[in-house]
Amino acid sequence: MSLGGFDVQVLRENGFATEEMTLNMGPQHPSTHGVLRFVVRADGEIMTEAVPDVGYLHRSIEKISEKVGYHGFMPYTDRVDYVAAMPCNQGWAMVSEKLAGIEVPRRAEYCRVIASEFNRISSHLIAVGTMGMDIGAFTPFTHALREREHINNLLEELCGARLTFNYMRIGGVAWDLPPDFAEKALAYIDRFEPLIDEYNALISFNKIYKERLVNVAVISAADAINYNLNGPNLRGSGVDFDVRRDIPYSIYPELQFDVPIGTGEEGTVGDCFDRYMVRIREIQESCKLLRQCLQQIPDGPVLAKVPRKFKPPVGDAYVRVESARGDMGWYCVSDGSEYPYRVKIRTGSFTAMSIIEKVSRGLMIADLITVVASFDLVAPEVDR
Amino acid sequence: MDTAAIYSKLKERFGDVVLALETEHAGDPAIRIQPRAIAEVSAWLRTDADTAFDCLTNQSGVDYPDRNEVEVVYHLYSYSLRHTCVLKVGVSRDNPLVPTVDPVWKTANWMEREVFDLVGVVFEGHPDLRRILLPEDWVGHPLRKDFVEPTEYHGISTKRESML
């Protein structure tokens, strides 16, 4: 039938006439994790599809790399994913080192892992905190943010910044650990670890909370791989893969840690609850890693000798780093000059966003918020 | 399987469309494929039991004006066999047509949109080839080396004089 000039489909159930509507969600929306937009087609509360519209935060970071040189690009990598900037630093440093064949001092590798793991915890705290907030539980968010502040204090002591760290350098890190850092950090981890159980008691196994997550947006392992989901989103679907263990880099092969995967403990493997729980468990694993690093860190230099005019030989390299949002791919082409010829950054949020159109079919509108939160999307990382 | 072994397997199966094994440069070795054959080769790499590349981890476009070529680079990974492979195809800058690999790996849908948007490669058979990061009415492809930054966008200047 025609209504106001538009063709509409009318479904009748129980005597009610309904019609499909096209709704706009975003780009400014408190729970869309940054500036992104969905075009939602819904009949009542049930979505027939939600099509993401991205690009609002495109800052042409890849293009900038071609103008600023290898060393100069490091602060820009912080802005790719500002919630977890350390792994971005590490990815850029590693791809440059791979091209030029630079050996990184062991103490610097330890500093990198310490910084990255602290950053992973603080990023996952944001993820699990906003997960609660997005579906209406505000208090757990304040608990998560309180702990994140302590970690930010530690990272500020380490590198002077709380968000965009610019800590790593090609060939190592910018600064050694400050005096007493290891003691302070270990004391903090001792204090922090029991709080994870407290957090779980507060929200993770709360019945109302579980009702919103369990069996929502189930993604099979095959789909997760086909759509190239990464990190906790991939492991949530039961795929036992972690770049730190399976494509080892830095000093991870020498450290003991487990890779938590989704088991469908409350419902189906690959639902929102599994993705959430993987993050909680990864926080515990990061604590384990930090303890080992802080106790084992050797003495020595923290920066290899790298020329100011850094000119890697002609070639191209691809490295993968386990960021908080999963496997982050850095592809760099060098033409032998002091400027990168081309840089491509493949991020976990980008591929997670691409599966939303598929998983949203048949979900309630309110569940779209849960799905976005369960993927731990960071919009600037999608758009770069 | 390492790249050399995958290359000889491909060469045996597909013959002339598999152009070269590139190992001279710094970084990762790569296999160069004729653009026409990329979808077919990808589908085979995905299904063959010895290669089993179930994931396209990254797809990038690189512009080389001095040899009048746009290159599309495919970084493959196999979650079951835990090995990697890099494929490259080069097409003319003036008529950059590459068959889509969207039917092989679903993730290619968005990655190809990005390569189209920023580098201007047209993926034949792609179900939804629209710009993804830039506005729909943007002119040109910014990661082409000869891209000139426009002076304004809808009357908004892209330059500001320094206040100092």
Image (tube, helix red, strand yellow):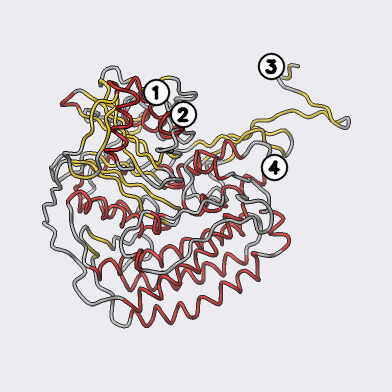
- Of callouts 3 and 4, which one flags the residue occurring earlier in the amino acid sequence? 3
Judged by depth in the image, the label closer to the viewer, 2 or 1, is 2
Judged by depth in the image, the label closer to the viewer, 2 or 4, is 2
Label 4 element class: loop
Q: Residues within 10 Å of mark 4 (few under 14, many from 20)?
A: some
Contact between marks 2 and 3 (CB within 8 A): the answer is no
| Picture coordinates of residue A88, whole percent (x, y) | 34, 54
Residue placed under numbered mark 4 in the picture:
A364
Q: Nearer the viewer, residue A148 or B60?
A: B60
Left or right side of A39 for A350: left
Judged by depth in the image, the label closer to the viewer, 1 or 4, is 1
Amino acid type at image mark 2: Asp
Residue A351, compared with residue A112, is above or below; it is above
Gap between marks 1 and 4, in whole Å? Answer: 34 Å
Residue B101, compared with residue A298, is above or below; it is above
Q: Tag on residue B102?
A: 2
Q: Residues within 10 Å of mark 3 (few under 14, many from 20)?
A: few
Contact between marks 2 and 1 (CB within 8 A): the answer is yes
Label 1 element class: strand
Residue placed under numbered mark 1 in the picture:
B123
Q: Quadrant of residue A178?
A: bottom left
Judged by depth in the image, the label closer to the viewer, 3 or 4, is 4
Gap between marks 2 and 4, in whole Å? Answer: 28 Å
Q: Residues within 10 Å of mark 1 (few under 14, many from 20)?
A: many
